[in-house]
Image (cartoon, grey):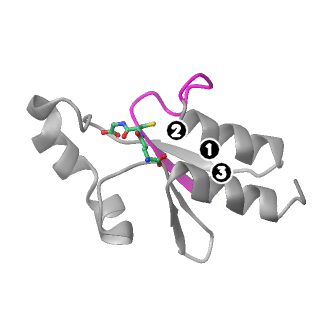
Amino acid sequence: MILFTCGQGGNRLDPHCGKARKALDAAGFEYEVRKMPGYRLLPWTWSKLRAGRTEVKALTGSYGVPVLVLDDGIPIAGTQQIVDWAKDRTGG
Ligand SMILES: N[C@@H](CCC(=O)N[C@@H](CS)C(=O)NCC(=O)O)C(=O)O
């Protein structure tokens, strides 16, 4: 699986990408982390953001992260969606 994250790579204190990583780690999943460039709140990074997140955009229709891509290519977009997906598979 691949987890697309912001530039912090899902720092454990991050309430979005970090929360998604914590849920995946707690459930024992292995995944590759791909850090995405730019930041949506900083307009001067938007050209870098758009250029560097084309795969995320193609998968989800948006540039937002976190996005988890399953081994069969299905994307799960959004922190809570990823947390719920992990919990659903571990009973937790
Ligand atoms: N509602 C979204 C918010 C996600 C969010 O704020 N993600 C952070 C990264 S952890 C973000 O967007 N950072 C700016 C960016 O990626 O450009 C969710 O929970 O998935």
Quadrant housing residue 57: bottom left
* Total tally of numbered discs in the picture: 3
Residue positioned 18% across, 29% down in the render: 42
Give the x, y percent position of residue 73. 53, 74
Label 1 packing within 10 angstroms: few (<14), some (14-19), many (20+):
many
Residue positioned 59% across, 52% down in the render: 80
Label 2 packing within 10 angstroms: few (<14), some (14-19), many (20+):
some
Q: CA distance from mark 1 to mark 3?
A: 12 Å
Residue positioned 9% across, 30% down in the render: 44
Q: CA distance from mark 1 to mark 2?
A: 6 Å
Q: Is mark 2 within 8 Å of ligand 1?
A: yes
Q: Are marks 1 and 3 in contact (CB under 8 Å)?
A: no
Q: Amino acid at mark 1?
A: Ala
Q: Amino acid at mark 2?
A: His
In the rendered structure, which disc, 1 or 3, sits on the residue that comes first in sequence? 1
Q: Amino acid at mark 3?
A: Tyr
Q: Is mark 1 within 8 Å of ligand 1?
A: yes
Region rendered in magenta: 1-14
Q: Secondary structure at mark 1?
A: helix
Image check: 86 left or right of 9? Answer: right
Q: Which residue is mark 2?
A: 16
Q: Is residue 8 above or below residue 87?
A: above
Q: Are marks 2 and 3 in contact (CB under 8 Å)?
A: no
In the rendered structure, which disc, 2 or 3, sits on the residue that comes first in sequence? 2
Q: CA distance from mark 2 to mark 3?
A: 17 Å
Q: Is residue 71 above or below residue 5?
A: below
Label 3 packing within 10 angstroms: few (<14), some (14-19), many (20+):
some
The dominant secondary structure in magenta is: loop
Q: Which residue is mark 3?
A: 31
Q: Judge by depth and name the residue closer to the eye, 80 or 7.
A: 80
Q: Which residue is mark 1?
A: 20
